Image (cartoon, rainbow, N blue to C red):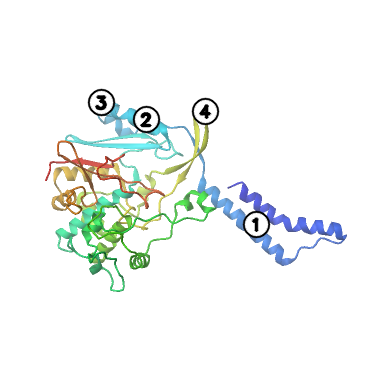
């Protein structure tokens, strides 16, 4: 891309003069290029050069070897035996690529253990740690579910409240078989609303990492127009099929109920009381400096060297309640410890883990959490998430299938 565009720009700039010279050669007169053609050729050449420069800045190729030897400082003070047990599994994951680095967090009665492996980004030999900021993708739904439970606890909304009651009268929320979509349907993925797919970029821009991930900002008008023109496939509360659109709508409904934005509401009701200082939609300056950069792998390798390009974050506030949160291992471990300890926010957090008998009597879902059952009948409450191009169209895993890579995994006694 960065080579083809400059060459194309050069060809466009000189082609009128080459053609004029050839014509003049046969006509035996002086070469002539009209002013209009000259301006058009120079304009196209400038556009090609600008696009080439943009592509070069965006792609920023990085040549690297898998940095297995990098170890964060605080890992030395952790449990050596636990680290030795985890290390082979993480090494296999990093060596497989395109995984650059991994942070593993473990909650123990004696305290949290955090181990970092690999590197924070392909361009830096800095290992990730408990303070490294990651896009958590679908894990955002755990926080949105907790926010709903918190607002129900404060009597600001009801679980069975129709979402239509929190939206303007001009918006028509789809119904099926006379059943309205309620807030609890949105939080449990049983609303019947479709999943969102990534808006396709232009074919040329799709080759450039930042643009291949970009999509138009999601606005309230976009959401309202989509709701008013959507037909749901089944009655709310009768099927389980995760929907990022449903979670985005839930966050917007809670915004309207509280008369504030999602970020402010989340910080006030959940992150502040729990002490989660690095869980946000809009990153602070210090969080940006600690943000883990994803990568898009290039083709081929040479003697263990690879090439990759940084993959940039989704636009902020695109769908804040569904996929837009960033957090750290330390913050997520604090959240898990609050669930296990039963404080603070014991009522709201406990409500999110309570199994919902919404679909054919199967207690397989909480508010933003999935629930599996061991052979002994003990519940395993979990959730996972992915950032990047796949996150808006993320397919909810089977509720009876264990997650591939649970980001938050807790177990508790049956309620």
Residue drawn at 63 percent across, 57 percent down:
46
Residue to which mark 3 is pinned: 81
Counting residues from the N terminus, which is met first, the one under dot 3 or under dot 1? Answer: 1
Label 3 sits on a secondary structure element that is helix
Counting residues from the N terminus, which is met first, the one under dot 1 or under dot 2? Answer: 1
Locate residue 189 relative to residue 349 in the image: left or right: right
Residue drawn at 40 percent across, 61 percent down:
217
Residue 278 visible? The answer is no
Picture disc at residue 303: 4
Counting residues from the N terminus, which is met first, the one under dot 1 or under dot 4? Answer: 1
Distance from disc 1 to disc 2, alpha carbons, whole Å, reads: 47 Å
User: Are discs 3 and 2 less than 8 Å apart at CB?
Assistant: no
Counting residues from the N terminus, which is met first, the one under dot 3 or under dot 2? Answer: 3
Label 4 sits on a secondary structure element that is loop
Picture disc at residue 91: 2
User: Are discs 1 and 4 less than 8 Å apart at CB?
Assistant: no
Distance from disc 1 to disc 4, alpha carbons, whole Å, reads: 39 Å
Residue to which mark 1 is pinned: 45
Between marks 3 and 2 in the image, the one whose residue lies nearer the viewer? 2
User: Are discs 4 and 2 less than 8 Å apart at CB?
Assistant: no
Residue 142 percent location from the top left of the image:
25, 50
Locate residue 19 relative to residue 289 in the image: left or right: right
């Amino acid at each position: 891309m960065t080579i083809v565009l400059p060459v194309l720009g050069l060809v466009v700039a000189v082609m009128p003069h080459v053609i004029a010279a050839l014509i003049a050669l046969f006509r035996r007169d002086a070469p002539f290029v009209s002013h209009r053609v000259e301006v058009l050729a120079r304009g196209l050449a400038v556009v090609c050069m600008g696009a080439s420069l943009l592509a070069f800045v965006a792609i920023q190729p990085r040549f690297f070897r898998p940095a297995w030897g990098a170890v964060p400082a605080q890992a030395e003070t952790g449990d050596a035996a636990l680290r030795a047990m985890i290390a082979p599994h993480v090494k296999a994951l990093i060596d497989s690529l395109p995984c650059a680095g991994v942070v593993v967090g473990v909650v123990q009665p004696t305290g949290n253990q955090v181990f970092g492996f690999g590197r924070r980004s392909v361009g830096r030999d800095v290992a990730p740690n408990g303070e490294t900021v990651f896009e958590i993708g679908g894990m955002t739904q755990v926080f949105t579910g907790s926010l709903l439970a918190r607002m129900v606890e404060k009597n600001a909304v009801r679980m069975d409240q129709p979402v239509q009651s929190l939206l303007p009268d001009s918006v028509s929320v789809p119904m099926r078989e006379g059943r309205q979509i309620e807030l609890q349907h949105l939080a449990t993925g049983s609303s019947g609303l479709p999943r969102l797919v990534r808006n396709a970029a232009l074919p040329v821009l799709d080759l450039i990492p930042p643009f291949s991930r970009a999509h138009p900002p999601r606005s309230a008008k976009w959401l309202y127009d989509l709701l008013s023109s959507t037909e749901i496939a089944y009655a709310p509360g009768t099927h389980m099929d995760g929907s990022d659109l449903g979670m985005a709508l839930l966050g917007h409904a809670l915004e309207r109920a509280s008369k504030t934005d999602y970020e402010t509401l989340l910080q006030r009701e959940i992150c502040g009381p729990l002490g989660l200082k690095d869980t946000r939609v809009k990153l602070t300056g210090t969080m940006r400096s600690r943000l883990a950069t994803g990568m898009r792998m290039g083709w081929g390798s040479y003697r263990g060297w690879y090439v990759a390009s940084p993959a940039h974050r989704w636009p902020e506030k695109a769908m804040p309640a569904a996929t837009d949160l960033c957090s750290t291992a330390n913050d997520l471990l604090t959240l898990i410890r609050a669930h296990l300890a039963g404080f603070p926010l014991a009522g709201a957090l406990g409500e999110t883990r309570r199994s919902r008998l919404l679909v054919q009597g199967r207690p397989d879902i909480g508010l933003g959490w999935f629930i599996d059952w061991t052979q002994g009948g003990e519940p395993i409450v979990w959730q996972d998430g992915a950032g990047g191009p796949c996150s808006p169209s993320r397919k909810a895993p089977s509720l009876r299938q264990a997650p591939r890579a649970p980001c938050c995994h807790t177990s508790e006694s049956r309620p």
